Structure formats: C-alpha cells, structure tokens
Image (cartoon, helix red, strand yellow):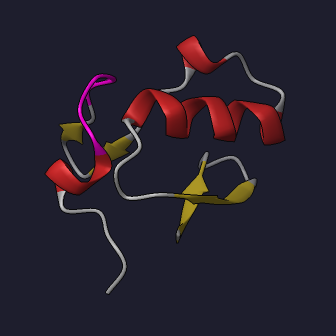
C-alpha cells in the first residue's frame, strides 16, 4: 500500500492510498471519489509526462521508497 499526494494547483491537496500494481485509471477513480470531480476529467502529470490510463503505477516507477 502506497500513499500518493495529488495537488490540483488551486489549493486542494488529496492523499490517496493505493497499490503499486493499480492502473492510473484506478488512481483517478480514487481521487475522483475524494474530490467530487469526474474521473475522466482528471489529468495526472509529473513535470511534462502525462500518465496514460491503462498503464500500472509500478511501470511509471511510482512505488514505496
């Protein structure tokens, strides 16, 4: 179980717990459940890299340190 912090750059931060073998789509659905935003409107980025929905978090090397 890993904890991911997401920031919407408008003052709202969300902390979500998920597994490293979850897909980005699963993470978006967890974030949507806490923020009230529809999951298809959420775009997850890290710098200039936009995460694709069908790829697992561990493939993007997002894991527990």
53 in the magenta segment: yes
Report the number of discs: 0
Q: Nearer the viewer, residue 3 or 47?
A: 3
Residue shown at 70%/16% (left/top)?
A: 38
Residue 14, placed above or below residue 10: below
Residue 44 percent location from the top left of the image: 41, 37
The single residue placed furthest to the bottom in the displayed view is 65
Residue 48, placed above or below residue 4: above
Residue shown at 19%/43% (left/top)?
A: 48
- As drawn, is 22 to the left or to the right of 40? left
Residue 37: which quarter of the image? Answer: top right
Residue 35 percent location from the top left of the image: 80, 37
Q: Nearer the viewer, residue 28 or 7?
A: 28
The magenta-colored residue range is: 52-56
Looking at the rendered image, the quarter that the C terminus falls into is bottom left
Residue shown at 37%/36% (left/top)?
A: 23
- As drawn, is 4 to the left or to the right of 48? right
10 in the magenta segment: no
- As drawn, is 36 to the left or to the right of 6? right
Residue shown at 27%/35% (left/top)?
A: 51
Residue 60 percent location from the top left of the image: 18, 52
Residue 43 percent location from the top left of the image: 44, 28
Our reading of the magenta stretch's main secondary structure is: loop
């Amino acid at each position: 179980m890993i904890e991911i912090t997401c920031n919407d750059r408008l003052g709202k931060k969300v902390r979500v717990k998920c597994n490293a073998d979850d897909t980005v789509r699963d993470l978006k659905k967890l974030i949507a459940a806490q923020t009230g935003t529809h999951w298809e409107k959420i775009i997850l980025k890290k710098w200039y890299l936009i995460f694709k929905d069908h790829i697992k978090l561990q493939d993007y090397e997002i894991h527990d340190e």
